Image: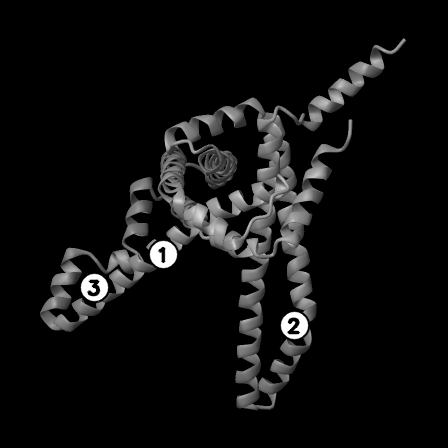
Amino acid sequence: MPPFYRAILKKAWYLSFQNIWLWVLGGFACLLGNGSLYQLLTRSFSNISEGGSLVYTLAQYVNSGLLGLLSWSTIKSVWAQDPSTIGMWIFSIVLGLSALILFVSLGVIGQAGALRGLVREIEGRKASLKESFLVGVEHFKTVLAINIFTKVVIFGLLLVIMSIASLFAYGEVWLSWTAFVLSLLIFITVSVIIYFLTIYSTLYAVLRGSDAKQSILSGWKLFSAHLWLNIEVGLIMFALGLLVTFVFAAVLLVGLGPVVLAYGFALYFAVNWLSALLAVIIAIVLIAAVIVGSAWFSTYSLAVWAILFEEMDAGRGFHKLGRVVAAVKQRLHRP
């Protein structure tokens, strides 16, 4: 059998660099992440290891940062001392919500638009940034509903995992650590499955025009029918992500090495203007590199899943384990 995974990875690599404009949409798609949920899970372990409970974890999380400032007692106290501060709070809340809405909207549009553009390129038809963006806008409601559903599922799962883990809060330290590690592994595994479901459901919505419910059902049917294939590709992409991160960090370290060294000398000899200038340069380069690198890898990952979707939907593709077993059987049955 011809190499299946290698062909997909090479084709996705080609597509991601041949259509750099897709990086814009891929960068937007990065905004639909689960970072806050991982933070909540990590914080829950910190509290559990100290003998805390699920209720205490959630209370601490809710009462931290901006949400902590919105308690009724705090608002009354500030209103009595300085009413103008309430206005600043309201402005900050409106600004924060506006930014959140903007990021989510761009993320949803970017995800749908990037997948549509990639599929058109896979099929040999030219696509453009404007056309793909408009497709994302057209299917915004459906893709948003899909993402809301998957995020609710992940958050509900997180609460269940935290509830179970909190039962071991009063046990031995090793038991708390074991509970956390198992919880993290389960959460990551299911999160990856939900990610597959989100991508496949979005592709059904964008390519087939299905509604959110039908897209999710079709996505789950496709995923479950090719379970091992998805798991193997997921493991490959996970390992590839680690490799890309390592190479990316190494290149940045080598590239910025002279600038960082010069910054250290500027600090040592108290050349304030030079150290400030170099600090700004380092910050700009780091931010730009992270944005560009994340946008590319997001586009590349979406290309892999889009190609895999096309193969599975057409009834092609067979997981590596199955191909190995088939090859062994073929050899055993040879005369």
Residue 270, given in percent of the width and then of the height, sits at: 56, 90
Q: Position of residue 166 (x, y in %)?
A: 37, 37
- Whichever of labels 1 and 3 marks the residue nearer the N terminus, that label is 3
Mark earlier in primary sequence (2, 3): 3
| Above or below, 324 relative to 257 | above
Q: Which residue is mark 1?
A: 102
Whole-angstrom CA distance, mark 2 to mark 3, is 41 Å
User: In the structure shown, which secondary structural element does the residue marked by tag 3 occupy?
Assistant: helix
Query: Which residue bears the numbered disc 2?
Result: 256
Q: Is residue 251 above or below residue 18?
A: below
What residue type is disc 3 on?
A: Ile
Mark 1, secondary structure of its residue: helix
The image quadrant of residue 49 is top left
Mark 1 and mark 2 lie on one chain; the one further toward the N terminus is: 1
Few, some or many C-alpha atoms within 10 Å of disc 3 (few <14, some 14-19, many ≥20)?
few
Q: Which residue does the image show at 63% across and 76% down from the upper left?
A: 260
- Tell me the distance, in whole angstroms, between the alpha carbons under discs 1 and 2: 33 Å
Q: Are marks 1 and 2 in contact (CB under 8 Å)?
A: no
